[in-house]
Amino acid sequence: MITARYHREVPQRFRLEANKCVSCGHINFPPRLVCPKCKGQKFDNVVLKDEGKLLTYTILRVAADRFSKETPIAVGIVELEDGVKITTQIADVDVDTLQIGQKVKLVLRKIQEDGKAGILCYGYKAVVI
Amino acid sequence: MVGIVGYGAYLPRYRIKAEVIAKQWGSDPVAIVRGLQLNEKTVPGMDEDTITISVEAAKNAVRRAQINPQEIGAVYIGSESHPYAVKPSGTILIDALGIGPDVHVASYEFACKAGSEAMFVAYSLVKAGEMKYAMGIGADTSQGAPGDALEYSASAGGAAFIMGKEKVVAEILFTHSYTSDTPDFWRREGEYYPRHGGRFTGEPAYFRHIIGAGIALLEKSKISPKDFKYAVFHMPNGKFPMEVGKRLGFTKEQIETGWLVPYMGNTYSGSSPTGLAAILDVAKPGDLIFMVSFGSGAGSDGFIFRVTDEITKVQDRAVKTRELLDNNKIYLNYGEYAKFRRKIKLNE
């Protein structure tokens, strides 16, 4: 059962909620209690921009059992407009056409299913725009 | 006057051509395309469902309305393909958009008219003064059994409408619903694919209910068909909406702006709502729009909208429906389509 863990991650997976260090301006995603850059402990809540560019990517042709019917799967690092870099799947794409630098947008997609009868887990993925 | 303050649509990028399906089953592609007037249809990605489609459409509606999502007092999603049998679709949507938790949420179902049902209730709650804004959504990832005629049409997509009283882009002038117990199309509990009554889905179902609601709306409003700029009807195939429009006194020119079905397919609960979104994308202040949905079982919801001066401010704030239909297409062969739609039985 992945219900509790999934539920805890909803603010980030659904709404890209992050926090920004008041003293140095570093954005943490997911939010942190102590800033990794300046050790500051005061933060403002921020929501990340949902557009950015593809910094790099790889193609999974042999995936874990749960995702084995979805191959090939493109996974990339996306730099969002506010400078935050996230790792995400790239959906709706012919993997042979992907290019570093392409503009992408984050959308809500189904990430996985907890077995045949378990919950459906949603979260962000990138699509090329 | 209460009406639409924001609207948005979403269509998946994947497509399959009707001729590909026809060839798979040994049917004549030319006859299918000509008879049903269906060239291709949208197909949801393996990670898309009614919830993800609703979320993207709703985000576009909020972008256009430019309102605080916290002020939305109700969210209703109408669909016949809610991913859960027990668990509402709208709870995921409100958390994704930052709506609530002080919000009323429900999943609606009435075959292909669940979306207009959601729109009607959202409109009625705002009109009653219960809340400032309410959102009604129609979305589906509809099912068609392999080899069945429905396989040529059953597609995926949806549209969302935020109702309110301020900065209204399309006022709702009149509504009318027409319903009877007509078993033209159904899916029993636990069954994967729906069944239908073949030709029985036509005259006693689709045509009777749309014409019933349509005539009542015209009589109630005392507006003549020729006074409308646009008309949109439920689109199970290309032929039916043109035929029912003609019988009600509308012309092809009035219907074709919202007539997305030849390249979108039948998005079920999202069908006429998506057509309405395409019309609002190009409508001008003062235009009158006539809309009648249809849901098997059976019933129709009719609306008359009058577009306001606000429309030109919101049209470019989000992606337009025809752009979603025409751009970024990825075509599938039948094998890929069968995999995407989980038509292939696999070992657990």
Image (tube, rainbow, N blue to C red):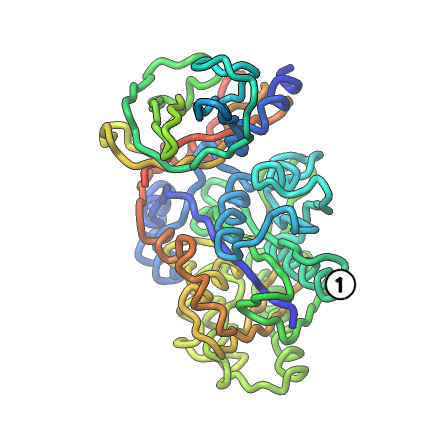
Can you give x and y, in whole percent of width and height, for residue B282 in the image? Answer: 40, 68
The answer to whether residue B60 is visible is yes
Can you give x and y, in whole percent of width and height, for residue B106 in the image? Answer: 71, 46
From this view, report whether residue A37 is shown above or below residue A15: above
Q: Quadrant of residue B132?
A: bottom right
Q: Residue at x 56, y 26 (%)?
A: A121
Q: Nearer the viewer, residue B274 or B288?
A: B288
Q: Residue at x 36, y 44 (%)?
A: B15
Q: Nearer the viewer, residue B171 or B249?
A: B171
Q: Quadrant of residue A86?
A: top left
Q: Residue at x 49, y 26 (%)?
A: A20
Q: Amino acid at mark 1?
A: Gly
Q: Is residue B275 left or right of residue B21?
A: right
From this view, report whether residue B49 is shown above or below residue B198: above
Q: How many marks?
A: 1
Q: Secondary structure at mark 1?
A: loop
Identify the chain of the residue marked 1, using the numbered disc in the image.
B
Q: Nearer the viewer, residue B292 or A76?
A: A76
Residue that protrudes farthest toward the front in the picture: A23
Q: Residue at x 59, y 74 (%)?
A: B304
Q: In the rendered image, which quarter contains the C terminus of chain B?
A: top right
Mark 1 closeness class: few <14, some 14–19, many ≥20 residues within 10 Å: few
Q: Quadrant of residue B113?
A: bottom right
User: Residue beneath label 1, please?
Assistant: B129
Can you give x and y, in whole percent of width and height, for residue A85 in the image? Answer: 37, 24
From this view, report whether residue A82 is shown above or below residue B74: above
From this view, report whether residue B103 is shown above or below residue B129: above
The answer to whether residue A92 is visible is no
Q: Nearer the viewer, residue B305 or B263?
A: B305
Can you give x and y, in whole percent of width and height, for residue B66 in the image? Answer: 52, 54
Q: In the rendered image, which quarter contains the N terminus of chain B?
A: bottom right
